[in-house]
Amino acid sequence: MAIERVEQAAGAVLVWAHARVREVACYTCGHAASRVHSRYDRRLADAAISGQMVVLRLRVRRFFCDTTECGVHTFAEQPVGVATPRARRTPRSREMLESIGLALAGRAGARLATGLGMPAGRNTLLRLVRALPDAPVGEVTVLGVDDFAIKKG
């Protein structure tokens, strides 16, 4: 990533950045693509700095996939560790909000997140917690049978 400029405005730190790589692999076929179709800006919420909200303005390029067998004609680059498809937050910001949601959830978590510079609503925190994968069960040593379910068919 190359940082173009950093600005402080209205209680937030704005960071303009773009990827520096020349070629990107197509996510469908894996073929390297270097022909740029277009560019667009993404706004991503990042982890806070000193209690101030950080907004990452990421310049993303769309590339042509020149492989004829590939069903995708154009695709957007996704800088690893910075952006995921259709996300409004960086992975680090999401992890931090998931931790807050697991610890406090609801309104208390929303107040803490806002105080830390990462404003998020109570429903957002709960949705992030619900989206977490379940813990692995492991080996089952004892299995109980429900007699009533057998009688009901």
Image (cartoon, helix red, strand yellow):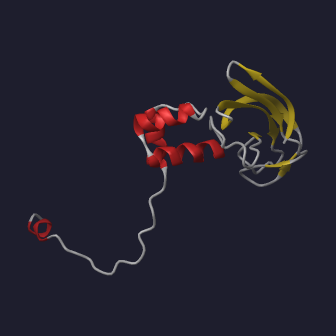
Towards the viewer: 39 or 31:
39
Query: Total number of numbered labels?
Result: 0
Q: Position of residue 100 (x, y in %)?
A: 51, 44
Expressed as whole percent of the image width and height from the top left, the position of residue 107 reads 41, 34
Quadrant of the snapshot with the C terminus: bottom left
- Extreme residue toward the front, this view: 50
In the rendered image, which quarter is residue 41 located in?
A: top right
Please give the name of the residue rendered at 59% of the width and 34% of the height, measured from the top-left corner: 118
Q: Residue furthest top?
A: 10
Decide: is 130 above or below 148: above
- State which quarter of the image contains the N terminus: top right
Asked if residue 111 is positioned above or below residue 153 in the image, the reply reads above
**Residue drawn where x is 66% and y is 30% of the image:** 53
In the image, residue 9 sits, relative to residue 119, either above or below, namely above
Residue 45 point in image, percent of width and height: 65, 33
> Which image quarter: residue 137?
bottom left
Please tell me in which quadrant of the rendered image residue 73 appears: top right
Nearer-the-camera pick, 131 or 147? 131
Task: Choose between 126 and 6: the one closer to the eye.
Answer: 6
Q: Along the line of sight, which residue is nearer the eye, 23 or 9? A: 9
Residue at (82%, 53%) from the top-left corner? Answer: 31
Looking at the picture, how far across and down is residue 62, in whole percent? 79, 36
At x 89%, y 42%, the residue is: 20
Q: Is residue 20 left or right of residue 107?
A: right
- Is residue 147 shown left or right of residue 113? left
106 left or right of 146 in image: right
Q: Residue furthest bottom?
A: 141
